[in-house]
Image: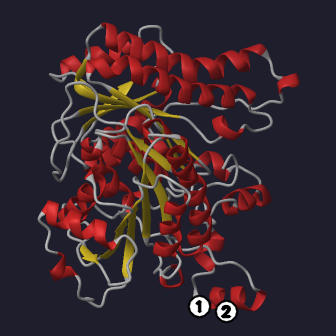
Amino acid sequence: MADKILEFVHTSTGKQIAAALGLPVPPMLKRAKAGYAEKSLANSNALVGASAFGPVATAVVKALNAMGASIKVSADLAGLDGIKQAAAKAKVDLSISQADNGVPENVYVLDVTSAANVADLRLLYDFFNPRLRKVPSNSRIVVIGRPRGDCKDALAETAQSSLPGFIRSLAKESGKNGTTANLIQVKTGAENGIEGALRFFLSPHSAFVTGQVLPVVGAPKGVKVAAFSEKPLTGKLAVVTGAARGIGAAIAEVLAREGATVIGVDRPADESVLGATMSSIGGIACPLDITDADAGKKLAAVAAEKGGKIDIIVHNAGITRDKMMRNMAAHLWDMVLDVNLGAIVRCNDQLLAGDAFGTNARIVCISSIGGIAGNAGQTNYAATKSAVIGYVDAMAKQLEGKGISINAIAPGFIETQMTAAIPVVTREVARRLSSLSQGGLPVDIAEAVTFMASPLAAGVNGATLRVCGQNLVGA
């Protein structure tokens, strides 16, 4: 369902009324209109800083250069020395990009992985404070730090622990004009995974992702971080459950856009809708009840018929059966637990036992911010979505040795048929309860899923990424 208020306040009349009444104006987000491009930051100025020269600063400069950004430096730039050394190491000529090309800075990347005490945190202020008043709409901010487990002592751990709170606050300040701010926590030795994460966070593909922390822990055993290529899923076979409509259909479409062949799965009752959706993207319709005891085996058989193994599986299918716990019938509890959780576990177990996953396969599960914050009347649903987060974390450790990664996406308020049925006042309040002051679209979830399913996320494993516009619920 369209957000009529968002559309109205961006008309000339709407702008006048909003200004007269002092109403906030939700930003118009710039979303991707095509697939990933090699030079995605062409004609962009990237302001870069670093707490010290090191492998992260070098990886950042290399990545921005590969994306076609003009790496902007100035005499008063905090962290300049580290960037200069990194540029020399990466063989990037900063002298070419020092001149202002007339394009305002719309990309800001700060490496603070070397921050090891309270004094080092001054770099955050020095880098951002002089510039935030002039940040253009739909800009991208990324801070890069280390996970606490990588820190050499308590002071360093303390300094790095400041970054999630900083980025969440900065995201709330900058979201009014559609700018996003996110934190990458890169494990020592996993620096080759930085480019993929930056390609996502610095692009329109992440328009509804802000205030989030993404751990880059390194690729699973035997997995090499591949050089970027357009249509990175070419030759991959992807399975998407709940693919007939809504978020599932959007996921299937974006995976296909990036080159994947998609097997769409949905209830036999939705076979005609599923068929139409798959036909539109050159996919394969597979009407199947995912709660079937042998659903995983049947999916493996379908993949084998198409001459391959499953490279990507997206566990998107899910249901709600809302009741206050005191009023909930047992069958409503059992139904939600089976569809949203039991089916995922059984399916993955069968695919693993049958050796049905391809080399370097990627599993993506759909959680929800409801599983993080909880919702009254959704104890069954919230339990499953919280369990998915724990399942992903636990399975990542088990699957790493097999070269398989598993991650989760936790959507917030997304404009779907389900949310369109919410009473008007409740729906409008829910839309505005985020730093971006609007609900997301199914394509926002699809973009995040596709990132996790692609080589761009080779260094990400066991993570749950919220796609919620930094919803204030559970923030």
472 shown above or below 11: above
Classify residue 358 as left or right of residue 246: left
Q: For residue 186, what is the image quadrant? A: top left
* Labels 2 and 1 touching (C-beta < 8 A): yes
Tell me the kind of residue under disc 1.
Ser
Nearest to the observer: residue 150 or residue 314? 150
The percent coordinates of residue 149 (x first, y second) are 47, 35
Q: State the SS at label 1.
A: helix
Identity of the residue drawn at 63% across and 81% down: 9
Tell me the kind of residue under disc 2.
Gln
Crowd class of label 2 (few under 14; some 14 to 19; many from 20; radius 10 Å): few
92 shown above or below 146: below
Residue 112 in view? yes
Q: For residue 78, what is the image quadrant? A: bottom left
The residue wearing badge 2 is: 16
Classify residue 432 as left or right of residue 458: right
Residue 35 in view? no
Identity of the residue drawn at 54% across and 47% down: 155
The residue wearing badge 1 is: 12
